[in-house]
Amino acid sequence: MAQYGKICAKLWDTPRFTGMSEDAQRLVIYSFSNRDCNVIGLYRFRLLHLTLDILYGGWAWKRKRLAAAFNEVLEVGWFRYDHGLDIVQICDWFDEHTIDNPNHLKYVISVIDQTPRTLLLGDLIKDIEKRPNGIDDNYIDDLMEALSKRLPNGIETVSKHIDIDVAIDITTDIDIKAPRKRGVVDEEFDILCLEVLTDLNRLRGKRGDGLDVEGTGHRKFIKRAVMKDRATLRDFLHVNKVKASQWLYSSMETHLVPKTLYSEKNFDCYRTEVMAPDNQLSEKTKKRLAIAAKLTNMEGGSDGLEVVRIPDAQIEHLPKG
């Protein structure tokens, strides 16, 4: 999860940026600074989550307004969009974002190695071939090799225009004052609960009874964290993994339950903790974490790129309990 986004000051003197509408400018800034943005400027950019962020941030945009801003940004060429994989690539990213030491290069390559196989990687290669200001010439070949290995042989899905209704798959305007209907927000909350509790069950393994992922007993603690702590899916998964690494096979493992993990007293502190190095974990714990990760990959769980966030305007309508 990105902790911050870099926006160069000269952006405000760039005619291409200043010539856009205010909505398009806001979307450009969002693309640089949202939580999914990464060190290569190529990342999962789900329009559904963007619509939730719009509500959450109080923008109160409707579909047509969002589509107009998004398509303006595409046409101006600030970023490219792979609608088949929901991925954005910010153009000329490395003109302003540097790779200036070997450790940073290793980290960038590790991100590339986990990037979905999108044709936008080819566009990123073309950008790097122009020898951008931010990359030391000694690192160009290593970057090109890593990117080339990830290039797909798939169908062209890169788009210069989107149909917002199809892309987001919703039928009502995104309007903070719209009449309440059960729909996308409820479904997002259901998905969030399923992901969180399934992940926790995988980490717990056979140690103790499995948590009921369908019932309402544990959902109230997830709802509390969403409402009070603005929790996202990443936050929950991070807390699950960190506390499992600390408590598995100890007297504390009985506390690997939502009531403890997501409580008002604990959750905000737990999500700021970091994982201990592998050499500080027991062999049994490392094995349990590895099995949980393998199950997630096999069963199509969260890929770690998505953020589920429930907008303030809809919180009061979440299922009770």
Image: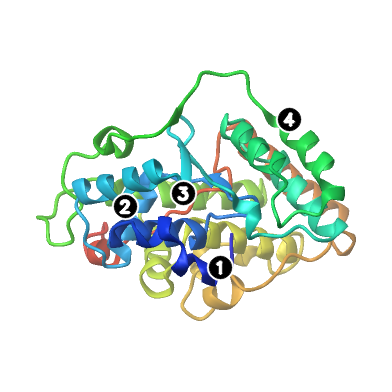
For the residue pair 124 and 19, the one nearer the viewer reads as 19
Q: Nearer the observer, disc 3 or disc 2? A: 3
Q: Could you tell me which residue is drawn at 60 percent across and 52 percent down?
A: 93
The amino acid marked with disc number 1 is: Cys
Q: Is residue 10 above or below residue 54?
A: below
Q: Earlier in the sequence, mark 1 or mark 4?
A: 1
> Separation of disc 4 and disc 3 at Cα?
23 Å
Say if mark 1 contacts mark 2, CB within 8 Å. no
Pointer 2 residue: 51
Q: Nearer the observer, disc 4 or disc 3? A: 3
Crowding at dot 3, Cα within 10 Å, few <14 / some 14-19 / many 20+, comes out as some
Relative side of 10 to 145, left or right = left
Rendering coords of residue 100 (x, y %): 80, 61
The amino acid marked with disc number 3 is: Trp
> Separation of disc 3 and disc 2 at Cα?
20 Å
Q: Quadrant of the N terminus?
A: bottom right
Pointer 3 residue: 78
> Separation of disc 1 and disc 4 at Cα?
29 Å
> Separation of disc 2 and disc 4 at Cα?
33 Å
Q: Quadrant of the C terminus?
A: bottom left
Pointer 4 residue: 148
Q: Element under label 4?
A: helix
Q: Could you tell me which residue is drawn at 23 percent across and 65 percent down?
A: 313
Rendering coords of residue 239 (x, y %): 60, 64
Q: Element under label 2?
A: helix
Q: Earlier in the sequence, mark 3 or mark 2?
A: 2
Rendering coords of residue 290 (x, y %): 75, 45
The amino acid marked with disc number 4 is: Ser
Pointer 1 residue: 8
Q: Element under label 1?
A: loop
